[in-house]
Image: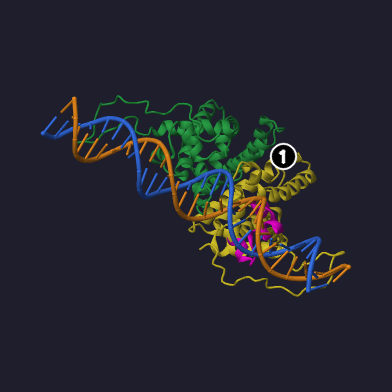
Chain colours: A yellow, B green, C blue, D orange
DNA sequence: ACATTTAATTACCTATGGTAGATTTCTTGT
DNA sequence: ACAAGAAATCTACCATAGGTAATTAAATGT
């Protein structure tokens, strides 16, 4: 299951001559196509799980390992890039759903539900990205997607609280805590097929909202 | 830095003959000493970081790899065992500190502070254990220590809420969320040397306590 | 057509988890 | 005490993965 290249990969592209760069450079061609490589990585991870190797990803992309390395860098860079992409997509989806919220609490509820749903939809990718990179840089790497998410949360929390005259200094810690709670509940939920999305959403929202809401705020319709 | 065994390891033990098992078994001796192996693993991880290999651990323990494998199993089993030990110790320390709490909120505060402090004290070990195992079993493994911790939280939350007439059904999700928040804040805190322990504790406690307390807001037990 | 330059491929290296086979050591029967 | 045998241990190995150097093929300028 190593090489086994079905196609000899004898240079599928050969004709290319649009804007040739400078003096006498040559053989630009597809030029790695970082996006294509990342898309191939996503495709393989989706169908083959989180245990895929870089060589397998290269093969999936129809290239060889050095090409993959030139295009996206080492494993850490790959995970980082995939995390960026996934965070971008999930953030977009969630934002769209949150836009229709009727209240701040409802916005949080939609955010939680959207996060859970997005993680389920991209289960393997989510796990691949959040599992991070093995090695000594765990501290940095295990927080890849978390950092991306937490940043946005932090802004929202800080502005929300500042607008209501509450101390925004808690925004950093709270945003990280929220992301941690969200992530761990997501992992647990992906494992337990039994739990219902809406129930989990409601419970987690209750926990998080209780922390975020302000005293003067009306009680969220307690039952 | 590979072999370098200072002592020839020529079988330090030789006298042993208490309860010989059955017919003609022999060479019981120390018999692997699972505890010793785990202690050696902890020692090495503490001083060498999370990137230690199984072979390095074996050498640190003064044995060879197969012995390590026989004693504690594969890497997954090692991480699991170390997680158990660390969770046990941290839980003990935290429990001792919580015992002196003056209120439920104070208990939570002491718990948060104790967790942060324990993680800092065993920084490398904490990272090693929470980083989990690479491979396809990430879902199971990345929650090793979390599960251990969450279980205890869940009991506490459930009984606390049940005693106050609130729905204990949220205990599972909440405990996982709490552990996630705690863990992520811990990772962040271990990275940012700047943040003060008491400040972080206070902020995180505020977030968590708001969710757990149930004065006016009985939390929508919509489940 | 030829040489040069650039890019891609192959082949390799290192390190790690994990294990099988060779070896030594100890027990125990006689 | 000595040989036979069982058991535990050690050495050596395998497989895989990340990462890279050296080799080969292609494309253009002259």
Please give the range of residues in magenta. Answer: A56-81
* Circle 1 Cα neighbour tier, 10 Å, few/some/many (<14 / 14–19 / ≥20): many
Give the total number of marks visible in the rendering: 1
- Whether residue A32 is visible to the viewer of this picture, yes or no, is no
Q: Residue at x 69, y 40 (%)?
A: A173
Rendered view: A68 above or below B100: below
Outermost bottom residue: A15
Name the foreground residue: B62 vs A182. Answer: B62
The residue carrying mark 1 is A170
Name the foreground residue: A170 vs A140. Answer: A140
Rendered view: A214 above or below B3: below
Rendered view: B32 above or below A43: above
Q: Quadrant of the N terminus of chain B?
A: top right
Q: Is residue B140 shown left or right of residue A34?
A: left
Residue A111 position in % (x across, y down):
66, 56
Name the foreground residue: A159 vs B1. Answer: B1
- A69 in magenta: yes
Dominant SS type (magenta): helix
Residue B142 position in % (x across, y down):
53, 47
Residue B91 position in % (x across, y down):
50, 33
Q: Residue at x 60, y 44 (%)?
A: A135
Q: Secondary structure at mark 1?
A: helix
- Whether residue B198 is visible to the viewer of this picture, yes or no, is yes
Residue C16 position in % (x across, y down):
52, 44
Using the rendered view, name the quadrant where residue A164 is placed.
top right
- A118 in magenta: no
Q: Is residue A192 shown left or right of residue A132?
A: left
Q: Chain ID for label 1?
A: A
């Amino acid at each position: 299951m190593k090489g086994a290249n079905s196609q000899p990969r004898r240079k599928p592209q050969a004709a290319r001559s649009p804007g040739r760069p400078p003096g006498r450079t040559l053989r630009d061609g597809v030029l790695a196509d970082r996006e294509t490589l990342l898309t191939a990585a996503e495709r393989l991870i989706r169908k083959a799980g989180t245990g895929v190797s870089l060589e397998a990803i290269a093969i999936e992309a129809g290239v060889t390992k050095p090409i993959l390395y030139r295009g996206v860098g080492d494993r850490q860079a790959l995970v980082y890039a995939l995390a960026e992409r996934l965070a971008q997509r999930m953030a977009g989806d969630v934002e769209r759903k949150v836009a229709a919220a009727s209240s701040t609490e409802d916005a949080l509820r939609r955010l939680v539900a959207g996060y859970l749903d997005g993680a389920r939809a991209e289960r393997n990718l989510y796990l691949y990205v959040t599992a991070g990179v093995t090695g000594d840089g765990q501290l940095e790497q295990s927080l890849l997607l978390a950092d991306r998410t937490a940043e946005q949360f932090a802004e929202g929390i800080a502005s929300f609280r500042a607008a209501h005259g509450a101390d925004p200094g808690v925004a950093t810690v709270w945003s990280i805590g929220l992301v941690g709670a969200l992530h761990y509940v997501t992992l647990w939920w992906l494992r337990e097929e039994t739990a219902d999305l809406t129930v989990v959403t409601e419970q987690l929202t209750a926990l998080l909202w209780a922390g975020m809401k302000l005293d003067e705020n009306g009680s969220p319709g307690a039952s």
